[in-house]
Image: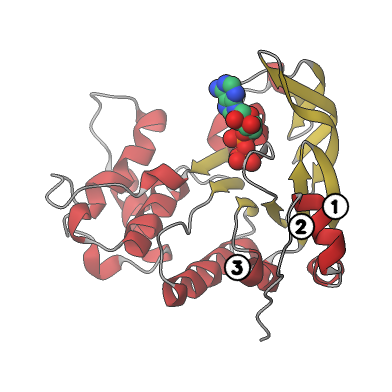
Amino acid sequence: MITMKDVSFHYENKDVLKNINFEIPRGAFMGLVGPNGGGKTTLIKLILGLLKPDKGDIFLFGEPIHKFKAWNKIGFVSQKSNSFNKGFPATVYEVVSMGLTAKIGYFKFPTKRHKQKVLHAIDQVGMKEYTYENIGNLSGGQQQRVFIARSLVSEPELLILDEPTVGVDYENVQRFYELLHDLNTKKNITLLLVTHDTGTMTEYATDIVCLNQTLHFHGDPEAYCSLSETELSKFYGHPVNLVTHEH
Ligand code: ADP
């Protein structure tokens, strides 16, 4: 779904990514981890076409990124999504229907089928009973589910999530990962998840990529968990305690 070949990028005089090579196969649940400032957000911006690499090639769904048009196949949920204040005047239904705007255009009335899609997306993330609730009254974890639903209405094949569990408490993080796992295995949605939460993530991801300017590791969660703390400290540039959660 995504191929990066020898991709490098710098801001002004700061090298951020060097010779990045990796692929995300269809059906993967890839966890992207690494230290702050390691280049994760920059990598996502390159994949979303918001930045252009200095060198190297990016392919989306087999097409060079500059020719790629089917952006509705890619959903994006950012960390900053869940910052609605109490009293923000929109219901869950209204927020989720914003995900259809790209398809139906502004100023056009949604059809009955569009409405069904919105309700279905809300149901998929387990928020049916909150459909007409004000978004500002929901917890951070519930709001994050609503933002997933907003990206699901356009039926993406690939969902990219940037630190979606920041500010979500432990129990809801577990539920959130279960939702992602269902989307991945039952709805066949390929996932790329940027996270600091390496403990819970290793229970669900199929692949882990560790980025700090270059790719330091790419493999399955078992291989990642078997890395010693010394090896991980080399990646991160500081001591690391790897906390894993057993099933
Ligand atoms: P991460 O998401 O892994 O924390 P980022 O991709 O946000 O890393 O940042 C990588 C490096 O690039 C950091 O050193 C950051 O300070 C720098 N950086 C990020 N955005 C910009 C920008 N717009 N201009 C200049 N430097 C930036």
Q: Is residue 159 above or below residue 175?
A: above
Please provide percent x and percent y for residue 233: 79, 58
Please provide percent x and percent y for residue 62: 79, 32
Instruction: State the image quarter where residue 28 is shown.
Output: bottom right
The residue located at (85%, 53%) in the rendering is 218
The mark found on residue 70 in the picture is none
The mark nearer the N terminus, 3 or 2, is 3
Q: Is residue 117 left or right of residue 230?
A: left
The mark found on residue 181 in the picture is 3
Label 1 and label 3: CA atoms lie apart by 22 Å
Q: Is residue 2 left or right of residue 230?
A: left
Name the residue nearer the viewer: 28 or 240.
240
Query: Which quadrant contains ligand 1?
Result: top right
Name the residue nearer the viewer: 100 or 108.
100
Label 3 and label 2: CA atoms lie apart by 15 Å
Neighbourhood count class around disc 2 (C-alpha, 10 Å): few under 14, some 14–19, many 20 upward: many
Nearer mark to the viewer, of 3 and 2:
2
> Can residue 114 be spotted in the picture?
yes
Quick one: quadrant of the C terminus? bottom right
Name the residue nearer the viewer: 24 or 186.
24
- Give the residue pinned by disc 2: 208
Name the residue nearer the viewer: 108 or 81.
81
Please provide percent x and percent y for residue 78: 47, 43
The kind of residue tagged 1 is Phe
> Is label 2 in a helix, a strand or a loop?
strand
